[in-house]
Amino acid sequence: MLRAETERFGIRTLVVEPSGFRTDWAGRSMDVAAMPAEYADIAERYAASDDPSSTLQADDPERAAEILVRLVEREQLPHNLPIGVNATRLSTDFDRAQLESDLRWEQLGRSADFGQPYPVAIPD
């Protein structure tokens, strides 16, 4: 929506969806209060992220910065940019699932408009 509202003024937008980067935001520089037992698995993942080989922080912030600088120099930008292996995989998986859902429910959604067939079957 932001893009549609601002591009006529020459303002370009890019939504960046990053993976976990080695910035130490969840490492030595972060004070973590005691977590309830229900969140133990999350605490374990944060502890693992302090490991340099962890896939939670697999991305190189310098490479990401270089990519973004190269992109903003171009005339055309993507609408959004998942950056990093995890973000790209999660975004692509979500987009595929969203498209499958939209296609499955398309006829039902369209049936709300005048001039469209109604009623239509609700998918199983």
Image (cartoon, rainbow, N blue to C red):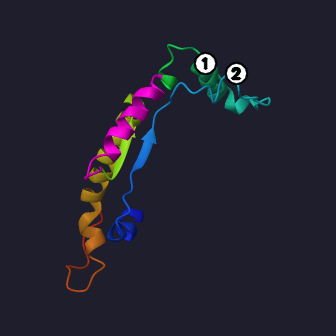
Residue 109 found in image quarter = bottom left
Q: Position of residue 101 (x, y in %)?
A: 31, 54
**Residue 103 falls inside the magenta stretch:** no
Q: Amino acid at mark 1?
A: Asp
Q: Position of residue 99 (x, y in %)?
A: 28, 52
Per the image, label 2 sits on a secondary structure element best described as: loop
Q: Position of residue 74 (x, y in %)?
A: 27, 47
x 39%, y 36%: residue: 83
Q: Residue furthest front?
A: 73
- Callouts 2 and 1 close, C-beta under 8 Å: yes
Residue range in magenta is 58-77
Residue 123: in sight, yes or no?
no
Q: Amino acid at mark 2?
A: Arg
Check disc 1 and report the residue beneath it.
50
Q: CA distance from mark 2 to mark 1?
A: 8 Å
Check disc 2 and report the residue beneath it.
28
